[in-house]
Amino acid sequence: MASILALLPLFFSAFSQGNALSLNYYTKTCPDVEYVVAQVVREATMKDKTVPAALLRMHFHDCFIRGCDGSVLLYSKGGNKAEKDGPPNVSLHAFYVIESAKKAVEAKCPGIVSCADILALAARDAVVQTGGPTWDVPKGRKDGRTSKASETRQLPAPTFNISQLQQSFSQRGLSMEDLVALSGGHTLGFSHCSSFQNRIHNFNSTHDIDPTLHPSLAASLKSICPIKNMAKNAGTNMDPSSTTFDNTYYKLILQKKSLFSSDQALLTIPKTKDLVLKYASSKEAFNTAFVNSMIKMSSITGGQEGRKVCKVVN
Ligand code: HEM
Ligand SMILES: *[C@@H]1O[C@H](CO)[C@@H](O)[C@H](O)[C@H]1NC(C)=O
Ligand SMILES: *[C@@H]1O[C@H](CO)[C@@H](O)[C@H](O)[C@H]1NC(C)=O
Ligand SMILES: *[C@@H]1O[C@H](CO)[C@@H](O)[C@H](O)[C@H]1NC(C)=O
């Protein structure tokens, strides 16, 4: 932990744009914020085991578009179609958890805590609730005023190869180490057929099925998704322990049993392959790297205001 904290000033100078984050940002103005958010996430998880995965992915999407500014939380309004209604939105859900955490925080300290900070805290709590590592979340993000469905095109796609992934991450100041560690978020949650159908139907002109996909997994995915463009809710868990935060994801990649081309792509160059091997063999090494990279990703800032409710701008 000490080594992570020592690195913080470096991340901030490199990645925050304008608003500096700090660990004690709300110590005087809203000392209970972390406890209140954790409580809401814990209760929501008890009722619905899919909540942690949703919160972790929501934070990732937020940070990759306009920085971690709560833009993913905004509703479409009037003529504007918001991020949450953009194409790769199939599994974005559990927005109500952030809204109820915000309500609970507002009751304690009105007008102090941004929605972007609440989402960053909730993503950390989601990892903790599923048995993953904990860490201190830097705070002080501001909420943005813009959310556009068209900008979700900037998110990395599950069909990306390693150079496309590298480009997507480096544009946001994130390294190949961050790419491999953060992809470990795929230890949690669910995927719809649309996200991996490229690998099991007309993969390319010579192979119907991606030869880097294990035949037994390919067969089972084909039975779940027998045709292209299946009904919206068909799909499968990301890994067999999809409600537990662990390093199974990396073991699956080595067995050719990960779901997305973008997961399997991590084996295609030595640098990322070595990290996959390392995290597959050491849960501790994965946890340490994940925490470092989450702090880095969640420190990409961008907003201007503190929203009163998370789904609409002030
Ligand atoms: C490296 C680039 C990434 C790509 C291409 C990618 C792509 C995807 C796709 C296609 C899905 C399934 C959506 C669906 O079919 O419902 C998904 C789910 C998910 N992703 Fe990623 N992702 C990436 C990085 C990340 C990162 C950095 C995190 C968090 C640290 C993350 C966390 C998750 C989680 C938790 C789910 C499951 C969501 C749920 O069950 O509600 N992903 N991702
Ligand atoms: C996802 O996006 C599609 C197409 O833009 C939209 O019709 C749909 O309502 C969105 N789904 C959710 C859950 O927001
Ligand atoms: C990745 O895909 C892009 C776009 O299709 C292509 O230009 C590039 O050559 C590919 N890179 C690798 C390493 O396959
Ligand atoms: C199809 O994909 C396989 C595996 O990546 C590759 O070996 C083969 O050359 C590809 N075929 C074409 C026509 O691109």
Image: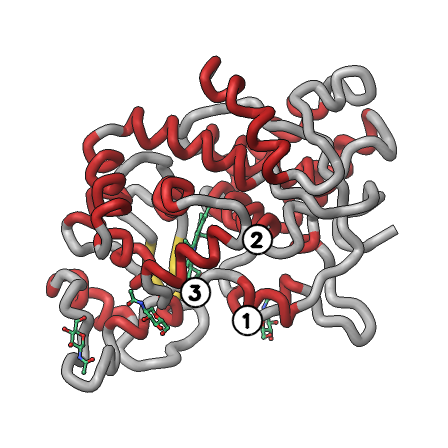
Residue ID for mark 2: 64
SS at badge 3 = loop
Q: Using the image, determine if residue 87 lies above or below residue 307.
A: below
Q: Check mark 1 vs ligand 2: CB closer than 8 Å? yes or no.
A: yes
Residue under label 3: 157
CB at disc 3 and ligand 1 closer than 8 Å: yes
For label 1, the residue is 87
> Could you classify mark 3 by the number of other residues whose Cα lies within 10 Å: few (under 14), some (14-19), or many (20 or more)?
some
On the image, the x and y values in percent for residue 134 come to 48, 24
Q: Is mark 2 within 8 Å of ligand 1?
A: yes
Q: Earlier in the sequence, mark 2 or mark 1?
A: 2
| Residue found at x 38% / y 59% | 191
C-alpha separation, residue under disc 2 versus residue under disc 1: 15 Å
Task: Write down the quadrant of residue 282 in the picture.
Answer: top left
Using residue 187 as the reference point, say whether residue 53 is left or right of it. right
Tell me the amino acid under the disc marked 3. Answer: Ala
Residue 258's spot in the image, x, y percent? Answer: 25, 55
Q: Amino acid at mark 1?
A: Pro
Dot 1 lies on which element?
helix
